[in-house]
Amino acid sequence: MSSISTRLRTQSIRFAYSGCSPDALRARKRCRVPTLPRNSPLSASRFAASLDPVRSVHSRRHGSSKCKSGDFSEPLEPETGWESPAESIQPSVPGEQFSIVEVLKKSNSFLPHVVLASTLLALIYPPSFAWFTNRYYAPALGFLMFAVGVNSSERDFLQAFKRPAAIFAGYIGQYIVKPLLGYFFGMMSVTMFSLPTSIGAGIMLVSCVSGAQLSNYATFLTDPSMAPLSIVMTSLSTATAVFVTPLLSLLLIGKRLPVDVKGMVSSILQIVITPITAGLLLNRFFPWICNAIRPLLPPLSVFVTALCVGAPLAINVDSIMSSFGLMILLLIIAFHLSAFVIGYFLPSFFFQKAPDVKALQRTLSFETGMQSSLLALALANRFFQDPLVAVPPAISTVMMSLMGFSLVMIWSRGRATGQ
């Protein structure tokens, strides 16, 4: 009798967590108890309660549970096809979710490849982009500026008050360092390499325009925390371009080619100020509309940028492939490379004690080396009769994007390796 009592006591303890009573055990009934998953954070009591809290409470009060008849000698295993709640209610991993909205939002990551593909296609088969004539440039630029406004807010501009010295350094690089470089390489193209005067004017015109919105995205890919500062820099240079760009073009090009300053001011107002203001107001008063259209803006911006890059190359392919086309390409590369380098080392002289000096160097390098060459191209096509003036901005549009996103890949890889 003592051995029988010991066996019953052991079996009672063994199945205590399942809610089975000794009476049920004596009735030779076997409970349907799932095995607790290994490494589960749930304790035995919590796991049993998660199966059926009502039944668990009832079992503790009345000492009974629903059991399935059978022999106790059979091993206790989970029933076939039964799934543990701890396994069935697994939290979803965000990284494994597929969303077409997220794909659309990340379309800008394909921009370097799209720019390169449109460049090759325009050079190999010019008719693919030749239909995108000059009359489409202004609306296309306006759309890109509108996209910048929709993705900005008043909070982005408030960031400028926190780092006014950095904003001023970016402005110096944009409208002093870059125009000086443009004048230097423009004069070099005419005096040293005997290129047409229109080519030198095109190089100078590239150096007179505001910063490019692509610099904001490049900064975001490299240093996300510096993206608001980059947006403020570009917005400030774009807002003041309505006065600075005509003044610089008059100082650098006015004596060589006729420039309609009033027409340029009106054009910048239509292409830059109005679309950005409309985007900001839409984002401020109708955010639900912005949330609906924002996922569509990145792929459309990539498509519009590809058209704006490929079309000028296709239209001016004869000039680019001419005897001095290679020389223009080398001069444009030298111009942008000098701007990237000076913009990178400029903060090291004034912000040595800043904790994020390296990130600030990369941000100012993008701001100085990348400018709105599409705006220069639109101005060249509208206000200059000589089509050669548009060749340097067309080449600059391609090289600026390729060089900027090459730096993104280099610096991102360096940060990943801890260098």
Image (tube, rainbow, N blue to C red):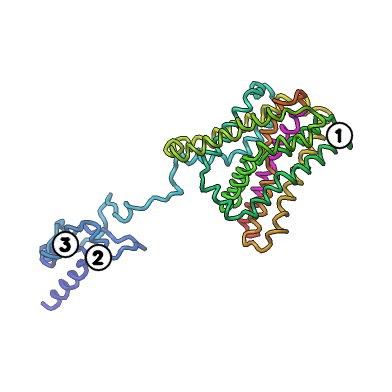
The spot of residue 99 in percent (x, y) is 44, 41
Residue 57: mark in rendering: 3
The spot of residue 411 in percent (x, y) is 65, 52
Residue type, numbered disc 1: Val
Q: Which element type, helix, strand or loop, lies under badge 2?
A: helix
Marker count (numbered)? 3
- Judging depth in this view, the residue of 69 and 114 nearest the camera is 114
In which quadrant of the rendered image does the C terminus lie? bottom right
**Which of disc 3 and disc 2 is earlier in sequence?**
2
**Residue 222 seen in the figure:** yes
**Which of disc 1 and disc 3 is earlier in sequence?**
3
The residues bearing labels 3 and 1 have C-alpha atoms spaced at a distance of 92 Å
Residue type, numbered disc 3: Val
Residue type, numbered disc 2: Ser
In which quadrant of the rendered image does the N terminus lie? bottom left
Mark 1 residue crowding within 10 angstroms, few (<14) / some (14–19) / many (20+) = some
